[in-house]
Image: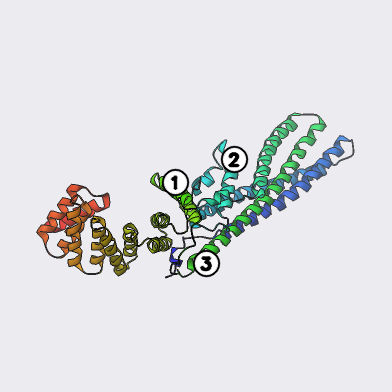
Amino acid sequence: MSNAASVPPFSSARARAALVTLLLVANVVLSLIAVASDYLAIQLFSDIMTGQRVTAGAVVAIDTQQRTIAMAQLVVLPVTALFFFVWIHRAHKNLKALGAHGLKYSPGWAVGGFFTPILNLVRPYQVAKEIWKASDPNIDDDYDISWQYARSSSAIGWWWTMSLLLLLAGIAGRAANQYFASSETPEAALIGPAVILVSDALTALAALLAIRVVTGIGVRQRQRHRRLSELLAKPAKPPELPPAPLDPEAAKEFLERGMVYASTGDDDYAMVEFNRALTYNPRFAEAYYNRAVLYHEKGDYARALADYDRAIMLNAEMSEAYYNRGVLYGGRGEYQNSIADLSRAIALNPQDAGAYRSRAVAHANSGNHSLAQADLDKAIALDPQNAEAYLLRGTARGNGGDRGRAIADIQKAIELGLVADQQAQAEAQLGLLKA
């Protein structure tokens, strides 16, 4: 059996990253040109201040040059920002596809943080750091939160530091330009170009660091996806007896902590504790079982099946492991395997109404409706308040032409209470049977 089907959807951000990188390079080039032009402007005003002869044409030329460069920057910078936001949304959206859990931000808020006043002083840095760490290709377990302890990149810190300094330089530049416009002293003429030169230099530095962040995250995400794909594409091997326990008592403590986390819905932390329990006792059937349940709930059926297998290998009397594995097989359409496991669960726990109900579904899907109805009779006898069992038996009786008893069963199911989808199904079936 291959695990390839369980590889989560992943959409490479390479094309977006390439476009953003190209635009950032354009920003670097424009900024360097602007720095050179700013320097020439400063030289011009210095010449004026020192009394050297400067023609009106030279002043007009440098002013035109400065305006042209500024206009080009005004066009390129917003376009770069737009595509940067598109890229960061996709890069963050990929994190769950890469198995990262316990994320603090959503893809929408990863972008929205740039536009939230005050918060946008720190949120872009936090988001970029989260994307970098959660894309770590060296994290072995993709259903874990250990990525939170991965190392970040200094480039992210420097990038955001330069961006904040750029913001301050922009504010200072406006103030300087206002001062320059209202001042009659020649010395004031140097303030505006000097601040603009600093701002342009910071823009070039910030863009270079942003290129490092964008390309670095892209490489990490592709490497992680490739590694997970190779891992999940390997054929599943029959379980082997794990190594001997190291510290069974410590393993029990981690298991108990994991079960507490699981009971409160903190599945990511529960997974960490189950993994730790198995580190200390690789032959801990209960830890495999509880981890399998989490994998099962997350939809990672290949890993869930492997852990159910290990739990059963280590404890052949664990009825709940047979039950859950039987349900998993049934969901995959492997009805004979499902029936075999559920029959074993019933043999170990004859009072398990849920096992009879689930086996009835497997029998029905296999085309054996008489055995399905017999199992539903037993499930209802064991649990007379099981609305779903009445609905299933009513459906089976209706398909078999026993309309009277089918109507009674479905009405009983509605009376006992069903979840919304089943309620709608029951009401629709009841209407057809009464028509």
Q: With respect to residue 168, does 311 lie above or below?
A: below
Q: Residues within 10 Å of mark 3 (few under 14, many from 20)?
A: few
Q: Amino acid at mark 2?
A: Val
Q: Which residue is nearer to you in this view: 390 or 169?
A: 390
- Residue 162 in view: yes
At x 45%, y 59%, the residue is: 283
- Residue 414 point in image, percent of width and height: 18, 50
Looking at this view, name the residue that lies furthest to the left.
404
- Residue 435 in view: no
Q: Which residue is mark 2?
A: 122
Q: Secondary structure at mark 2?
A: loop
> On the rendered structure, is 117 left or right of 318?
right
What is the tally of numbered marks visible in this picture? Answer: 3
Q: Amino acid at mark 1?
A: Arg
Q: Which residue is nearer to you in this view: 410 or 19?
A: 410
Q: Quadrant of residue 309?
A: bottom left
- Residue 415 point in image, percent of width and height: 17, 47
Q: Which residue is mark 3?
A: 230
The tag earlier along the polypeptide, 2 or 3, is 2
Quadrant in which the N terminus is drawn: bottom left
Alpha-carbon span between mark 3 and mark 1 = 32 Å
Alpha-carbon span between mark 1 and mark 2 = 34 Å
Q: Which residue is mark 1?
A: 257
At x 70%, y 51%, the residue is: 28
The tag earlier along the polypeptide, 1 or 2, is 2
Q: Amino acid at mark 3?
A: Glu
Quadrant in which the C terminus is drawn: bottom left
Q: Report the mark closest to the observer, 3 or 1.
A: 1
